[in-house]
Image (spheres, rainbow, N blue to C red):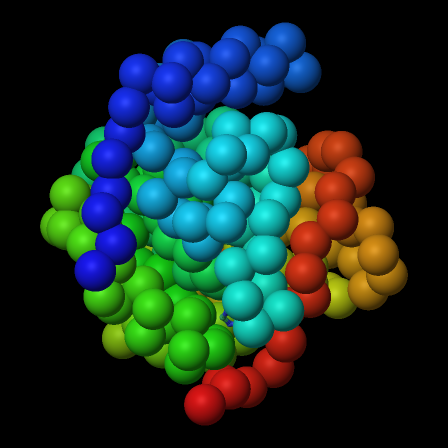
Amino acid sequence: MRRYEDNYKQKGLRKQLVDNIRQKGITDENVLAAINNIPRHYFLDTAFEGIAYEDRAFPIGEGQTISQPYTVAYQTQLLDVKPFEKVLEIGTGSAYQACVLGELKVNLYTIERQKKLFDLVKTFPYKSKYPTIKFFYGDGYEGLPTYAPFDKILVTAAAPAIPEKLLKQLKVGGKMVIPVGAQDIQRMLRITKTGEDEFQEEVFDDFSFVPMLTGKKG
Ligand code: SAH
């Protein structure tokens, strides 16, 4: 059984990481506080514990990654969540981003298409700190029609195009943050649903995510 410990050294490194991403342009103090509060090394294999607070992505198995902290902070800042909002996340992965949203007290629904990653998260003890997060195994392209509509939708994998079904599951006035692009580099978009069939699009910086794939993987 793995022993989880958050010591003074890790806390210190985490504070440096927060200063680092603040310098890179993250200004939302609630987002920075969430990053400061979460022991990122818990989400990684013990082999990466010593470098968990470098601002970079790391492998989490099954060809997937935990996103770079700057990217997590950037997407969370754009999502602009308020406590108790109903939020859908596509791509649970390590559940690090999910816990950042948990720190911000949102009512989160998160979907993962890979059964192995979903099962791993199920047995991850730290997640019990955030009882407002609900985990689902499924295809994010389908969203969660039973629980729709959502105030916010966050996609944490690269979508070749904006998934229509997700737009339908957004409340009027709601926002979706999604990296869009078929190649190695994607553009971060924020879509605001201004009417039943009306949307406004804002374009932000370029990022590099693992692809959003169709269907479930058992
Ligand atoms: N938010 C994650 C980042 C994980 S990387 C974290 O904080 O660790 C992207 C994740 O999206 C991967 O785990 C991948 O399996 C998942 N994914 C890709 N396509 C998906 C889809 N259609 N539905 C749900 N999850 C998907």
Res 78 seen here: no
How many numbered markers are drawn?
0
- Left or right, 194 with respect to 83, comes to right
Choose top left, top right, bottom left or bottom right for residue 121.
bottom left
- Residue positioned 49% across, 72% down in the render: 140
- Residue positioned 41% across, 39% down in the render: 41
| Looking at the image, residue 105 lies above or below residue 135 | above
Q: Position of residue 25 (x, y in %)?
A: 64, 14
Choose top left, top right, bottom left or bottom right for residue 59.
bottom right
- Left or right, 196 with respect to 85, comes to right
Q: Nearer the viewer, residue 117 or 104?
A: 117
Q: Nearer the viewer, residue 28 or 43?
A: 43
- Quick one: which residue is furthest to the right in this view? 183
Res 113 seen here: yes
In the rendered image, which quarter contains the C terminus? bottom left
Q: Position of residue 167 (x, y in %)?
A: 52, 62
- Left or right, 182 with respect to 132, comes to right
Choose top left, top right, bottom left or bottom right for residue 162.
bottom right
| Looking at the image, residue 160 lies above or below residue 42 | below
Q: Position of residue 49 (x, y in %)?
A: 46, 40
| Looking at the image, residue 83 lies above or below residue 193 | above
| Looking at the image, residue 173 lies above or below residue 22 | below
- Residue positioned 83% across, 50% down in the render: 185
In the rendered image, which quarter contains the N terminus? bottom left
- Residue positioned 31% across, 16% down in the render: 8
